[in-house]
């Protein structure tokens, strides 16, 4: 299971990083058409994403004891979204000791 999760989160991280870099080379993030900004589904998707980011951030706050890491992760998630989240989880998965299961990801440090 751990190997599968490592592959999944590595894939998410690499895909999001590649897609973000590719998107940035195609057009500026500031060139959002007004039709998109006025679209209710665009707004609903943003709220959905940022509430999910908040949920993951609260889990990180529960799990981590370091205030500087919590502050860093807050800004990383707000700015990078799933790139930051997938990298955080991937690093946790890579740090698991032999014999530790997925439940070790949900325990406090």
Image: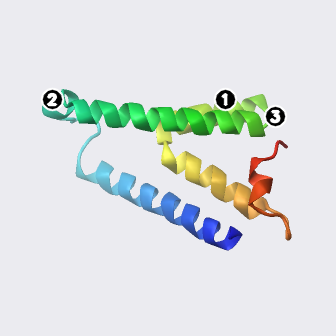
User: Tag 2, which secondary structure?
Assistant: helix
- Which residue bears the numbered disc 2? 34
Local packing at callout 2 (Cα closer than 10 Å; few below 14, some 14-19, many 20+) is few
The answer to whether residue 50 is left or right of residue 9 is left
Residue 91's place in the image compared with 67, above or below, is: below
Q: Is residue 30 visible?
A: no
Local packing at callout 1 (Cα closer than 10 Å; few below 14, some 14-19, many 20+) is few
Rendering coords of residue 38 (x, y %): 18, 27
Rendering coords of residue 42 (x, y %): 27, 35
Residue 37's place in the image compared with 26, above or below, is: above
User: Tag 1, which secondary structure?
Assistant: helix
Spatial distance from mark 3 to mark 2, Cα to Cα? 42 Å
Q: Mark 1–mark 3 contact, CB under 8 Å?
A: no
Where the C terminus falls, by quadrant? top right
The mark closer to the camera, 1 or 3, is 3
The answer to whether residue 43 is left or right of residue 70 is left
> Front-most of 27 and 105?
105
- Which residue bears the numbered disc 3? 65
Q: Residue 71: which numbered mark, if any?
A: 1
At 50% from the left and 38% from the top, the residue drawn is 52
Rendering coords of residue 108 (x, y %): 82, 42
User: Tag 3, which secondary structure?
Assistant: loop
Spatial distance from mark 1 to mark 3, Cα to Cα? 11 Å
Q: Residue 25: which numbered mark, if any?
A: none
Mark nearer the N terminus (1 vs 3): 3
Mark nearer the N terminus (3 vs 2): 2
Choose top left, top right, bottom left or bottom right for residue 59: top right
Q: Is residue 55 visible?
A: yes
The answer to whether residue 21 is left or right of residue 70 is left
Where the N terminus falls, by quadrant? bottom right
Mark nearer the N terminus (2 vs 1): 2
């Amino acid at each position: 299971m751990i190997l599968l999760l490592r592959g999944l989160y590595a894939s998410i991280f690499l895909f999001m990083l590649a897609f973000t870099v590719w998107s940035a080379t195609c057009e500026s993030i500031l060139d959002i058409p007004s039709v998109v900004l006025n679209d209710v589904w665009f707004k609903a998707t943003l709220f959905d994403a940022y509430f999910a980011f908040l949920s993951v951030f609260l889990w990180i706050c529960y799990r981590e004891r370091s205030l500087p890491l919590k502050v860093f992760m807050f800004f990383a998630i707000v700015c990078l979204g799933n790139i930051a989240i997938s990298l955080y989880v991937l690093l946790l998965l890579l740090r698991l000791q032999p014999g530790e299961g997925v439940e070790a990801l949900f325990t406090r440090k």
